[in-house]
Image: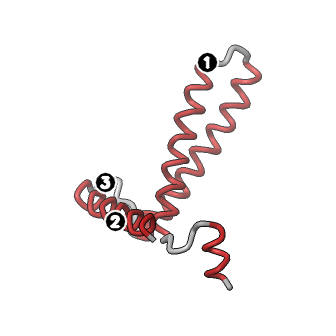
Amino acid sequence: MIELLKKMAGVAGMSDQVIATDFLISAKAEVRNYGVAITETATPELRAVLRNHLREAINTHEVIANYMIAKGFYYPHDLSAQLSADLKASDTAQNLAQK
């Protein structure tokens, strides 16, 4: 039953690494976008709201990155190991696309 639900949701076969990597990329984009939005905002009130959202986005990024480091999915201080992890994630994503 679970596999049927996964297929219906379009996530059948997705690994934790692929999901976490996608989440991390989204979190990075969110941080970047809030930073840009803050610099383009004219009112102090809106800047304050956006700063709060930026802090939350940074915290979310930290949680995801720490999870990925603990699981061996992310090596921010070891380029060679990160390249290997990225290639593995890329292969997994390509295999999922072919199914």
> Which quadrant of the rendered structure holds the C terminus?
bottom left
Disc 2 marks which amino acid?
Asp
Indicate the secondary structure of the residue bearing disc 1. Answer: helix
Question: Disc 2 versus disc 1: distance between alpha carbons?
Answer: 39 Å
Q: Which residue is mark 2?
A: 91
**Colouring of the image:** secondary structure
Q: Which corner quadrant holds the N terminus?
A: bottom right
Find residue 26 and report its horizontal and vertical position in percent. Answer: 54, 47
Q: Which badge, 1 or 3, comes first in the chain's sequence? A: 1
Label 3 SS: loop
Nearest to the observer: residue 52 or residue 95 = 95
Question: Residue at image x 50%, y 55%?
Answer: 22
Above or below, 83 relative to 32:
below
Marks 3 and 2, how far apart in space? 22 Å
Camera-nearest label, 3 or 2: 2
Occupied quadrant, residue 43: top right
Closest to the observer, 5 or 76:
5
Q: Which mark is residue 77?
A: 3
Q: Earlier in the sequence, mark 2 or mark 1?
A: 1
Residue at point 62%, 37% (across, down): 54
Mark 1 highlights which residue?
Answer: 40
Number of numbered discs present? Answer: 3
